[in-house]
Image (cartoon, rainbow, N blue to C red):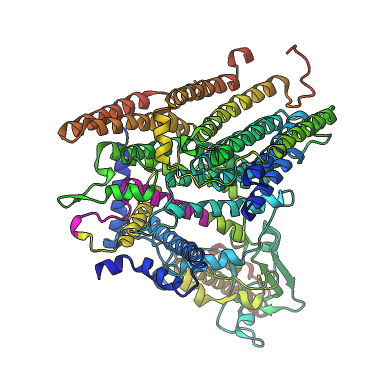
């Protein structure tokens, strides 16, 4: 197994864990955490490909990962803001309870 | 001879590891350095606690501790023995694992910061290219440990204290970073050794420290304010606010774990003063060109101890702020000032040598400071409290 | 494959699994910080110093704290009594397993053509800064705008609607 | 300007800090076990029992013989926290007036309960219980050690004069007056008896003036 394969497999596993969490957990915050894990797994892929790719000095993968971190931070802030405002409205963060379009 | 004294610890380390086989040398060298740091700062912590208690006493016209040993100099040892022999109480409903992990995470994160601080010429554990970033990454971790401590105790005072502490630390981390970014902009490097090297030259007898520039001075003041809040020191010690919250997030800690929190707080003070020294006060460089014969590590540690004294002095002077004052101060005064300071630093860089940049930069900062002071002191959120009595 | 890689990979995966399996929401948030720091160390293992420290600074220092605040603000810190998984958890699990199978199959299939060990790239923070200010300056500006908009948006979304309450 | 007050405050604390090393008046701390401030005359903390030194009714140690207390138990009844325990004696002894009185066979004060209210002193008709100034009474025994019995409670009148001179002088004067009065009464009684013995009439008028004098 080459180093790159190892990193890619870890990233794939982490992505699958995040996906499973996002699809199965009831708590909206934990679904967000699952999405963060998936984003992180993608970042790991980007960095791994940058490191073992043909042109690391071009910094493409690294830049992609840095921007992705910044975007993930924004996503977390907005997502959690939404969760909090939904909680104010519905008094629950249970996604199974939020199955109506009516407020 | 002077050279030897300056490099005494470096040569001592080289001499020590020269007895080992070559492949072990780097590893053992790092272990020795870590061991020295882990022993040195707790010792300084003991000294700082004594200084603080004596100094605060004198400021309040008291003696301070004077029972244990001559002039009470053995008091820290007595305190240490006391806290180590105390019973370690974990509340029944507490989350035992998180409760145990919190002080450990805090102390580890705090000590990690020393890895990149240059404590003397050639005396830095890891000369990292992204040293400043590493430092801030580590200090960001302490927030989580504070939350862990407060939440796992299952005590409303602990939780309130932790939430206050985390909110305060996040709010003041922004100006802390911003004021450091000005230095990074001028130096053009995140490496702390390069930042010190950039300040280690003299005009006449006066050093090129960043604090002696308009943007550096303003940055240092903002940095000092943010530091005081970041380390939860008075007047920003609301997280501990003993008159409201018992002891904040470490209410439910006793014995050795409490001692770890206490240690972590003081060591964080040392490390953040060390960073301030490195960024603005020229790190290990001497204050006057004719004093360069004094070993560089002496300068570094005396600057740290001096900042600790200032911390103590401020603590002895100012009353505690209210939560809303604290937040308003961070977001409406310190943050805009640091942002303006970034702009001024850029201006300083592009105006080039000459008297113009001194005048322009100082003028902008002073005008902004006075104007913001005038405006904000008049506002309801920020200024002196207006009492509304029942009509 | 070094020992360090296996340890860090195990730490990351364990943190991720714990975050998705534990019952108490705060424990999940703390576990996910373990995964985040594990990832940061993996970045360091890949010689991406800047990205690694940025990962710690952003995820452990900001996102984890944000999550924890959100949990406390939504009173989610108590361990729920009923199941923490949704009704159709089996479907989710199957989908995730399918995705992992496809990804893993793809990676292992292409293992032969993937590049092997290469020389350690020497990328300093200065290089990253230069790249950000020249080639990537437009994305940088867009991200700055995005962050500002996200901050304002988050504040407005989470702001209590005072007029409605009264 | 913003920050002016902070600078003023810092100057003030700095002045205090350095001033405390130069002017001794700043440090008002009295380092207690070694240095003490003499207690003011009205100091009071726990009660004690006064005894007179002149041994009036032989037998037993001096303090036991001279106790002014007659075990009337008024203080026991009045004590708000009920910290006084008195057992009356079976026999009687002569008091300072030369009158046969009961005495306390047991007189205990639990100072862990006593609240130093001084009510026992106010109600005592015999000036026998007074307030002490001794306060360092810590013991290693939480229950037994804090119950003071007669022997510990008894302090001489000289001691009382030493700690509360003015009050003790007034008490002594009062007791002397009482004694004079009692003596006069006894004398009058004796006179009366004598007169009765001498002549069986015209005695009563002699008693009246003695009572009037009181």
Report the front residue among C29 and D31: C29
Q: Is residue B62 above or below residue B389?
A: below
Q: Residue furthest front?
A: C113
Is residue C162 shown in magenta?
A: no
Q: Residue A67's spot in the image, x, y percent?
A: 52, 30
- Side of C47 where B336 appears, left or right: left
Q: Quadrant of residue C131?
A: top left
Residue C86 visible from this viewpoint: yes
Tally of marks: 0
Quarter of the picture containing the N terminus of chain D is top left
Tell whether D31 sits left or right of D21: right
Residue D77 image-quadrant placement: bottom right
Magenta residues, start to end? B263-290
Give percent across and percent down for residue B113.
Answer: 47, 51
| Image vertical order of residue D128 relative to residue A81, above or below | below
Magenta stretch: dominant secondary structure: helix
Judging depth in this view, the residue of D133 and C161 nearest the camera is: C161
Question: Residue C13 is drawn in which quadrant?
Answer: top right
**Residue drawn at x 79%, y 24% as measured from the top left:** A96
Residue lying at the far bottom of the rendered structure: D59
| B289 drawn magenta | yes
Left or right, B87 with respect to B36, comes to right
> Which residue lies at the image location 34% right of the left edge and 48% below the top edge?
B194
> Going 46% across and 63% down the picture, which residue do you hit?
B33
User: Residue D18: image x %, image y %?
Assistant: 28, 57
B220 relative to B385 in the view: left or right: left
Residue D98 appears in the picture as rendered:
no
In the picture, the quarter occupied by the C terminus of chain D is: bottom right
Residue B356 percent coordinates (x, y): 17, 31
Front residue of this view, candidates B226 and B351 = B351
């Amino acid at each position: 197994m080459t180093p790159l394969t190892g990193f890619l497999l870890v990233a794939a596993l982490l992505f699958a864990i995040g996906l499973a969490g996002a699809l199965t957990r009831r708590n909206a915050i934990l679904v967000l955490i699952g999405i963060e894990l998936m984003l992180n797994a993608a970042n790991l892929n980007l960095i791994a490909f940058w490191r073992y790719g043909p042109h690391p000095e071009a910094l493409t993968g690294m830049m992609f990962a840095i921007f992705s971190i910044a975007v993930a931070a924004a996503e977390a802030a907005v997502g959690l803001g939404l969760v909090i405002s939904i909680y104010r409205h519905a008094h629950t963060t249970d996604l199974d309870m939020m199955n109506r379009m009516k407020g | 001879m002077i050279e030897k004294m300056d490099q005494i610890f470096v040569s001592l380390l080289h001499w020590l590891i020269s007895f080992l086989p070559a492949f072990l040398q780097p590893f053992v060298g790092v272990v020795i350095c870590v061991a020295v740091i882990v022993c040195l700062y707790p010792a300084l912590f003991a000294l700082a606690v004594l200084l603080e208690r004596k100094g605060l006493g004198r400021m309040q016209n008291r003696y301070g501790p004077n029972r244990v040993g001559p002039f009470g100099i053995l008091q820290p040892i007595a305190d240490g023995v006391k806290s180590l022999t105390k019973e370690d109480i974990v509340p029944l409903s507490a989350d035992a694992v998180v409760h145990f992990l919190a002080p450990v995470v805090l102390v580890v994160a705090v000590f990690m910061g020393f890895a990149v601080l240059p404590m003397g010429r050639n005396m830095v554990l890891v000369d990292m290219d992204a040293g400043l970033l590493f430092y801030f990454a580590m200090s960001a971790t302490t927030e989580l440990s504070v939350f862990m401590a407060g939440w796992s105790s299952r005590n409303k005072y602990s939780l309130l204290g932790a939430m206050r502490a985390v909110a305060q630390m996040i709010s003041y981390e922004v100006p802390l970073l911003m004021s450091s970014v000005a230095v990074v902009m001028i130096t053009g490097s995140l490496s702390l050794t390069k930042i010190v090297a950039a300040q280690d030259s003299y005009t006449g007898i006066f050093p090129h420290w960043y604090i002696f520039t308009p943007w550096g001075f303003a940055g240092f003041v903002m940095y000092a304010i943010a530091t005081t809040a970041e380390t939860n020191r008075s007047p920003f010690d609301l997280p501990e606010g003993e008159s409201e919250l018992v002891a904040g997030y470490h209410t439910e800690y006793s014995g050795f774990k409490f001692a770890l929190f206490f240690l972590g707080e003081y060591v964080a003070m040392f490390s953040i003063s060390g960073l301030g020294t490195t960024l603005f006060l020229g790190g290990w460089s001497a204050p006057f060109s004719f004093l360069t014969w004094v070993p560089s590590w002496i300068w570094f540690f005396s600057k740290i101890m001096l900042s600790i004294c200032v911390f103590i002095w401020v603590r002895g002077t100012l009353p505690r702020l209210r939560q809303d004052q604290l937040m308003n101060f961070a977001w409406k005064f310190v943050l805009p000032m640091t942002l303006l300071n970034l702009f001024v630093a850029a201006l300083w860089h592009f105006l080039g040598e000459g008297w113009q940049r001194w005048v322009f930069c100082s003028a902008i900062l002073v005008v902004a400071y006075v104007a913001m002071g005038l405006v904000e002191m008049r506002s309801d959120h920020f200024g002196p409290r207006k009492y509304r009595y029942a009509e | 494959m070094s020992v360090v890689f296996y340890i860090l990979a195990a730490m990351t995966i364990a943190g991720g699994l714990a975050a998705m399996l534990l019952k108490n929401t705060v424990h999940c948030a703390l576990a996910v910080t373990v995964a985040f720091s594990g990832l940061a160390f993996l970045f360091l293992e890949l010689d991406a110093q800047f990205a690694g420290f940025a990962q710690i600074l952003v995820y452990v220092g900001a996102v984890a704290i944000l999550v924890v605040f959100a949990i406390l603000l939504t009173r989610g810190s108590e361990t729920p009594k009923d199941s923490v998984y949704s009704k159709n958890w089996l479907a989710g699990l199957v989908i995730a397993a399918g995705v992992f199978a496809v990804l893993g199959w793809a990676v292992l299939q292409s293992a032969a053509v993937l590049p092997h060990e290469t020389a350690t790239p020497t990328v300093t923070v200065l290089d990253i800064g230069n790249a950000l200010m020249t080639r990537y300056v437009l994305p940088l500006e867009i991200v700055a705008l995005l962050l500002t908009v996200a901050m304002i948006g988050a504040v407005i979304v989470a702001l209590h609607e005072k007029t409605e309450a009264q | 300007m913003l920050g002016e007050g902070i600078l003023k405050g810092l100057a003030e604390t700095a002045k205090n800090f350095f001033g405390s090393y130069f002017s001794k008046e700043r440090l008002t701390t009295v380092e207690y076990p070694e240095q003490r401030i003499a207690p003011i005359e009205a100091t009071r903390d726990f009660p004690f029992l006064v005894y007179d030194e002149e041994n009036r009714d032989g037998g037993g140690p001096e303090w036991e013989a001279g106790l002014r207390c007659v075990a009337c138990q008024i203080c026991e009844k009045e004590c708000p926290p009920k910290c006084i325990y008195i057992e009356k004696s079976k026999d009687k002894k002569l008091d300072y007036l030369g009158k046969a009185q009961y005495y306390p066979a047991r007189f205990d004060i639990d100072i862990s309960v006593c609240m130093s209210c001084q009510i026992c002193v106010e109600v005592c008709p015999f000036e026998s219980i007074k307030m002490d100034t001794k306060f360092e009474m810590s013991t290693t025994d939480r229950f037994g050690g804090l119950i003071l019995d007669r022997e510990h409670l008894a302090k001489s009148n000289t001691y009382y004069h030493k700690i509360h001179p003015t009050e003790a002088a007034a008490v002594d004067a009062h007791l002397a007056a009482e004694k004079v009065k009692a003596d006069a009464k006894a004398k009058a009684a004796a006179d009366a008896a004598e007169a009765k013995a001498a002549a069986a009439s015209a005695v009563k008028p002699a008693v009246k003036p003695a009572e009037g004098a009181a």
